[in-house]
């Protein structure tokens, strides 16, 4: 253990300009958690109920709606080096069929020094942080309600590893977590592991025990609301972009805007599906669609009139535009085949509805998919 140094900490910057990283550190300080400020030292932080872009969400059960972050101090200022979609909670699969008869594990908020670099999962082996370094406290969800309230607490070695979710769809954790701290994508997890392994303490000692901290997003934002907008995803200019590049610009902008309020849109957000697609295009630096930008058939007219190309479902890619049966709704595909579509939720007036290709059957038929060409 390193002895904490008795140096006066610099005063936090004036409260009106706190970045997400500064808010997280302030919250951890308040909780008396250990914070690593040395050169190259990584702080692994999970924020439950917050998207990696730094937006709170409603933390729906069985959805990838938590964030995995790596924070490092640069010249005394905390910076987020990486942020990925994650879950700190088990999915429906293991909640209903727990491996442990006393209930699936859900980690208790707090800080643990418990993980070493190793290999996870015999069926789909990958490098991960394995809980071989210390105990972890969990709640046992015996009543299978996806909540900690009233659940029994259990402390020990339970294989609460930091793993990948094998690119499972954003809307379904599936069997990816039985209580582990899981990053959704393989690529994101590889980036996470690469960062962790650059920590000088690991470079010096391959048995180094990593620490991770799990905090609730709602409490964080109540106590330390960030006042500096998270760094926007770099949006390319779309001049001379190929359709493939347009697709990634659209998909990135959609993910960046996920959760945005659409209350400023038509009917207080109730009728804001086309409006929100044009917000995404605007964010991606792409000209709006539709002579009437708030009306799905008008957007479809533009797509049919040269700006788009009809795509078969099995060829669909992230960033393709998904039009509901009867042109009653529109969303943006997030994955291969557009199996997950992000669109406006009328009832919630938010760009937050994640459905299947056919909007979970809400429009009584199959969707049509277009790719933007210009
Ligand atoms: Ca969650
Ligand atoms: Ca419970």
Image (spheres, rainbow, N blue to C red):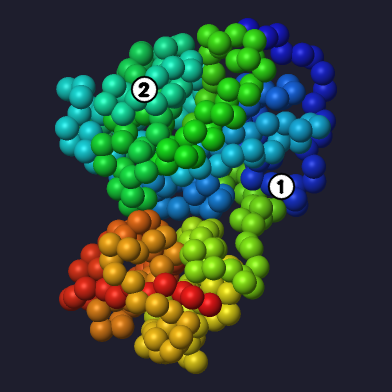
Q: CA distance from mark 1 to mark 2?
A: 37 Å
The residue that disc 1 covers is 18
Q: Is residue 231 visible?
A: yes
> Mark 1, residues whose alpha carbon is within 10 Å: few (<14), some, or many (≥20)?
some
The residue that disc 2 covers is 120
Please state which of residues 54 and 9 is positioned toward the viewer in this rendering: 54
Q: Position of residue 120 (x, y in %)?
A: 36, 22
Please state which of residues 104 and 361 is positioned toward the viewer in this rendering: 361
* Residue drawn at the location 46% of the way across and 44% of the way down: 85
Q: Is residue 33 visible?
A: no
Instruction: Determine which quarter of the picture holds residue 198.
Output: top right
The correct choice, above or below, for 235 with respect to 11 in the image is below
* Residue drawn at the location 33% of the way across and 17% of the way down: 158
Is residue 60 shown left or right of residue 204? Answer: left
Is residue 75 shown left or right of residue 216? Answer: right
Question: Is label 1 or label 2 in front?
Answer: 2
């Amino acid at each position: 253990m390193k002895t904490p140094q008795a140096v006066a900490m610099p005063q936090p910057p004036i409260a009106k300009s706190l970045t997400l990283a500064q808010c997280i550190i302030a919250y951890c300080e308040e909780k008396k958690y250990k914070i690593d400020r040395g050169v190259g030292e990584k702080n692994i932080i999970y924020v439950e109920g917050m998207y990696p872009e730094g937006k709170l969400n409603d933390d729906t059960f069985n959805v990838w709606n938590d964030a995995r972050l790596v924070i490092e101090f640069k010249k005394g200022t905390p910076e987020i080096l990486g942020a990925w979609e994650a879950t700190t909670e088990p999915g429906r699969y293991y909640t209903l069929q727990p491996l442990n008869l006393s209930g699936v594990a859900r980690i208790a908020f707090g800080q643990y020094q418990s993980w070493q670099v190793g290999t996870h999962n015999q069926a789909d082996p990958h490098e991960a942080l394995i809980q071989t370094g210390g105990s972890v406290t969990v709640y046992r969800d015996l009543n299978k309600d996806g909540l900690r309230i009233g659940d029994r607490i259990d402390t020990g070695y339970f294989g609460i590893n930091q793993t990948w979710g094998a690119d499972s769809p954003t809307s379904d954790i599936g069997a990816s977590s039985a209580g582990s701290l899981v990053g959704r994508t393989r690529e994101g997890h590889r980036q996470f592991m690469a960062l962790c392994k650059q920590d000088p303490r690991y470079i010096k000692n391959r048995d180094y025990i990593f620490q991770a901290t799990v905090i609730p997003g709602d409490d964080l934002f109540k106590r330390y609301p960030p006042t500096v907008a998270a760094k926007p995803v770099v949006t390319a200019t779309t001049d001379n972009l190929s359709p493939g590049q347009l697709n990634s610009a659209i998909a990135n902008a959609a993910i960046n805007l996920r959760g945005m309020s659409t209350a400023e849109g038509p009917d207080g957000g109730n009728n804001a599906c086309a409006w929100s697609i044009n917000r995404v295009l605007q964010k991606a630096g792409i000209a709006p669609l539709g002579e009437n930008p708030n009306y799905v058939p008008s957007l479809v007219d533009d797509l049919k009139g040269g700006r788009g190309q009809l795509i078969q479902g099995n060829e669909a890619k992230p960033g393709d535009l998904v039009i509901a049966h009867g042109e009653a709704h529109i969303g943006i595909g997030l994955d291969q085949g557009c199996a997950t579509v992000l669109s406006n939720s009328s009832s919630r007036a938010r760009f937050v509805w994640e459905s299947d290709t056919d909007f979970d059957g809400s429009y009584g038929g199959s969707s049509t998919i277009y790719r933007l060409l210009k």
